[in-house]
Image: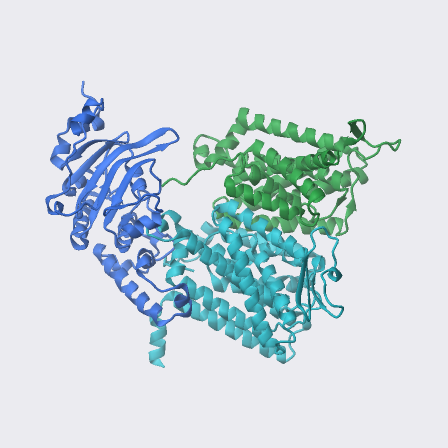
Amino acid sequence: MEFLSYLISGISLGSVYAIIALGYTMVYGIAKMLNFAHGDVIMVGGYISICATSYLELPGWLSVLLAMAVCTVLGVVIEGLAYKPLRQATSLAVLITAIGVSYFLQNAALLIWGASPKGFTPIIPATNAQGEPNALPLFGGQVSISYISLLTMGACIIIMLALTFFTGQTKLGKAMRACSEDKGAAQLMGINVNRTISVTFAIGSALAAVAGVLLCSFTTSLMPTTGSMPGIKAFTAAVFGGIGSIPGAFLGGVLLGIIESLAKAYISTQLANAILFAVLIIVLLVKPSGLLGKYVPEKV
Amino acid sequence: MNKLTKKIKGLKKTTKVDFATYLGVILAFVLFSVLRDAGVLNRSITGMLVPICAYIVMAVSLNLTVGILGELSLGHAGFMSVGAFSGVIASQSLQAAIPSAPARLAIAILVGAVFAAIAGTIVGIPVLRLQGDYLAIVTLAFGEIIKELINCLLVGYDSNGLHMAFNLDGSLTINDIGMEPGGMAIIKGAQGATGTETIASFTAGFILIMITLVIVLNLVRSRAGRAIMALRDNRIAAESVGINVTKYKMMAFVTSAALAGAAGALYGLNYSNLAASKFSFDTSILVLVYVVLGGLGNMWGSIIAAAVLYFLPEALRQFADFRMLVYAIVLILVMLATNSEQLKTLAGRVLPKRKGAAHNG
Amino acid sequence: MAEKKFEKGKMVPVPSHSIIPERDLDKSPILECSHLGIDFGGLTAVNEFNITVGRTEIAGLIGPNGAGKTTVFNLLTKVYQPTRGTILLDGLDTHGKTPAQINRMGIARTFQNIRLFNNLSVEDNVKIGLHNQEKYSMFSGILRLPKYWRQEKAAHERALELLSIFDMQDLADHQAGSLPYGAQRRLEIVRALATNPSLLLLDEPAAGMNPSETAELMENIVKIRDTFQIAIMLIEHDMSLVMGICEGICVLNFGQIIAKGTAEEIQSNPTVIEAYLGKQQ
């Protein structure tokens, strides 16, 4: 039973990673860049949600929508100002620019909201007004799943299915896939590459905002540096599942959450991240393109 | 005299650049030594001299991996960390055996380099089988693993020698590793190295930079260096002319790790307290920024970028709380200015065209 | 043997006679391939590739686009490991070797899509070809021991000497990536020659060259064979080059050898004409 509860918390944490990874994998697929600023968009999403609930006294669900809107605009602006001029530049130049953006977001947050952790009210509180836990009891109450966990898992699955449908069936989604395959050819087929990339960043950032609110609902605190480690882990998850693959990002995220939760519970709290990364290394050595990725050898 | 100028003119361009690099480092060292002894430099600047030396070595060594070998490494701080803590352990436990601080520092740096080279070999074997961003993410993973492992390390020294323990579940403390009551604690888990005798000096930093430059520049201009650059430019073609891919990738990667270890030892022995969390992913990124801004494969560029950018937050002190924000904006603007196509074409119209002469690093 | 294959239902008779020129007849061949083949995920790209190349022969490998010519080169240099068959180089089996080991055994090649070390100088490109003939260690290089200076001087002189084959010694300091197309192709040949091969594989050496450049290239290929006394095998679409200098020609279609012989034999072979022009009504 103890194992089961660790598993559940692993899956719900993993679902947050999966939502970030889904955004990351879309952006990576099309822009082919390690977007280190992605994690910081998560953090911004969290702060916007805090501001919405505490200053504007909006309800939780509305604060999520507001965070999504702000992050979408932020993502598009970042892409347009910092990444778009570097379309032809080396991937390292874009990487360093992304690091610059990451520094900028962190330090801007530091100036606006301060360095000390801010308390975050989960969008579904742990207990209801009567003091009972907001959770679904299982096996006669031996194990329970909190509603926030259920919400996270549900959101994650819905987002994954929606993205799969979007990239597979819609015109814009197909344009995205075409751009990620070959930008030059896509342009020749009449696809507006710049607009497609902007839309991808918008989707990725909106997902980051959702993930930010959910992540903070679990950790219940928020700092300017909160986003960077989940950002890295989500990228790890995307690589783990096979970068560019939507089901891969989902699978990678959930597995990563489970590994982290179980490693913390049964092996060592201190080494949880080390174990996580060790698993990533082993997977990549066995399958160099991730669990569901396709390996494309260089043509001679 | 005339003969000498003729000889200098006859040298290859790369040789001239190398000599200018050595000369520049020597002049900078002399200048800062004189200024420091004259009391012109304030304390915060003199305190930065040794770390700047360490970061210059870090940048030059990372440039070997990123610029010369052409593989993106995001875990360079891990090797610095291995070097720092093995160097600190060596220096602290040899306190009685070798009273001379410079000699002990030299040994500690050597120990740091050797241990980092071992770590580089262990990391390199799996990592170098991967390519591109996959390789990058795995180096990042190794950097984080090294950080967390050192975070769990407990090391002490007494008359029986070294005592070590691995604090897996967080329950052990420095008192549980079986030391005699008078023993000296060297590394206390997450607290890191404490009570280290700070024996690092600016002169030692200067010598280490010079040694690093000799190793890296001479390696690049030799048969092995050409093989490494051949792998960077076109792996398949390099294989087709008989170059052993694994051997030369490992050579570059391990050399780079060893130099980072040496830099780490110098850095570690500059502070009496040093935690493993100092050598996180952020530090790897910081050094990568130096390398990219200095120019890939360009060693003097790395040196200048490391020195200037390490100093920049200090120079931006007048902006107070805004200084890291300004730093970030400067970084983005510099990247846009040097890499944007529109700006390049604009600059191409204004500035005279450069000849397409060869430069190999 | 040839008849037997014909009876087995194969459309094409494979001539069993060797295309080795007379001057190599008393020597063992440099290259012998038998039953060589490779499948890519169930698709057979090359099958039953049997060929023998003499010590100083210039052999041509031709065929329509997609016939598997470059795949044959990739098999010979072990960029791909063959699914079937054996490759003997100078009588030695090359099974399980890496591309780098193959080069050290004596096969050098150029690439259809030029693969130079673009950021390095022309001279360094050639020196990388000389890599395995220089013998000083990493430490001699770092410490610049006398061995380093001696061997680097020798490598410099040898590189200029090799570049002079194509009259490129004046370009030594230029960046390889900035050379014009034709010069890049020639540099690739020089780099391959620098590895001291006994068999040189040229993948479309005349691609993108004008007729006068092609004529010059033909002369140079013959000159290289004569001075270095090596075998050369080339893939080319320019028939004037192939028919002009190749002593033996092998025609490939859909991964199968459809004809082998001298230029005259190939030109009059109905199967070859059919493969290139389609069946006549």
Image-quadrant location for residue A246: top right
Q: Measuring 83% from the left and 32% from the top, which residue is drawn there?
A: A133
Closest to the observer, A2 or B112: A2
Report whether B191 appears left or right of B354.
right
Number of numbered tags placed on the structure image: 0
Closest to the observer, A285 or B177: B177
Image-quadrant location for residue A10: top right
Q: Is any part of residue C223 visible from this angle?
A: yes
Relative to B325, is A209 above or below? above
- What is the image's colouring? by chain
Report whether B36 appears left or right of B5.
right
Closest to the observer, C254 or C241: C254
Residue, far top: C281
Q: Measuring 59% from the left and 38% from the top, which residue is drawn there?
A: A201
Chain letter corresponding to the colour cyan: B
Report whether B244 appears left or right of A151.
left
Q: Measuring 52% from the left and 44% from the top, which residue is drawn there?
A: B134
Q: Quadrant of the N terminus of chain B?
A: bottom left
Measured as percent of width and height from the top left, residue B300 is found at 49, 65
Residue, far right: A130
Relative to B288, is B268 above or below? below
Q: Quadrant of the C terminus of chain B?
A: bottom left
Measured as percent of width and height from the top left, residue A141 is found at 81, 29
Measured as percent of width and height from the top left, residue B25 is found at 51, 71
Measured as percent of width and height from the top left, residue A250 is found at 61, 33
Chain C colour?
Answer: blue
Chain A colour?
Answer: green
Closest to the observer, C63 or A89: C63
Q: Is any part of residue B293 visible from this angle?
A: no
